[in-house]
Amino acid sequence: MKTRRTFIKEFGGIAAVTCCGAGMVTLLEGCTSVKSIQGSWENKRLKVSLAEMGDDKFAIIRFDKLPAPIFLSKNNEKSRAFLMLCTHNECELKATGTYLYCPCHGSEFSSTGKVLKPPAEDNLKEYPVTADNTTIYIELN
Ligand code: FES
């Protein structure tokens, strides 16, 4: 017969391994780095140089007048920009190569701003994006 202490020792260890295993997947996915770029302000728009983006599909655009950075998803057809502020309780999100996650309560969002995992219920705030041959413009108004 197992004592309470033996039970906790055995099953607690299994639980810890399981948790670490699941966490490991998240950590590995989270290892993909996303480039961080300082945006500049011009004509009421946040401006990002395409040369700085390079071939990267995603970038974090920092601009000190915003409550959080912008997650920019670059696409030949249509680029999209999302405020990296969790819609659950306004924690700043972290970006991986494929999705955004909230360090406060664990919500996850796709690179297109959709909620993937609660407790957040609303998609991320999106800003209109335009571009020319050299620059991406994010309309913040
Ligand atoms: S503030 Fe992001 S999940 Fe709660």
Image (cartoon, grey):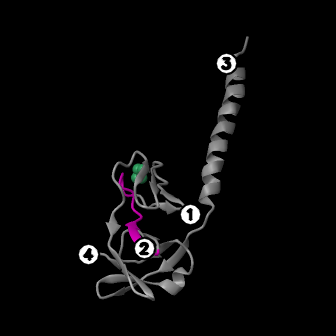
Contact between marks 3 and 4 (CB within 8 A): the answer is: no
Q: Quadrant of the N terminus?
A: top right
Q: Which residue is mark 3?
A: 4
Identified by mark 3, the residue type is: Arg
Please tell me the numbered disc located at residue 97.
Answer: 1
Q: Choose mark 2 or mark 4, whichever is in front.
A: 2
Q: Is mark 1 within 8 Å of ligand 1?
A: no
Q: CA distance from mark 2 to mark 4?
A: 23 Å
Q: Which residue is mark 4?
A: 141
Q: Disc 2 on helix, strand or loop?
A: loop
The answer to whether residue 82 is magenta is yes
- Relative to residue 35, is residue 28 depicted above or below? above
Q: Quadrant of residue 87?
A: bottom left
Q: Residue at x 56, y 74 (%)?
A: 56
Q: CA distance from mark 4 to mark 1?
A: 27 Å
Q: Quadrant of residue 86?
A: bottom left
Q: Residue at x 44, y 88 (%)?
A: 133
Residue interval drawn in magenta = 76-90
Q: Disc 1 on helix, strand or loop?
A: loop
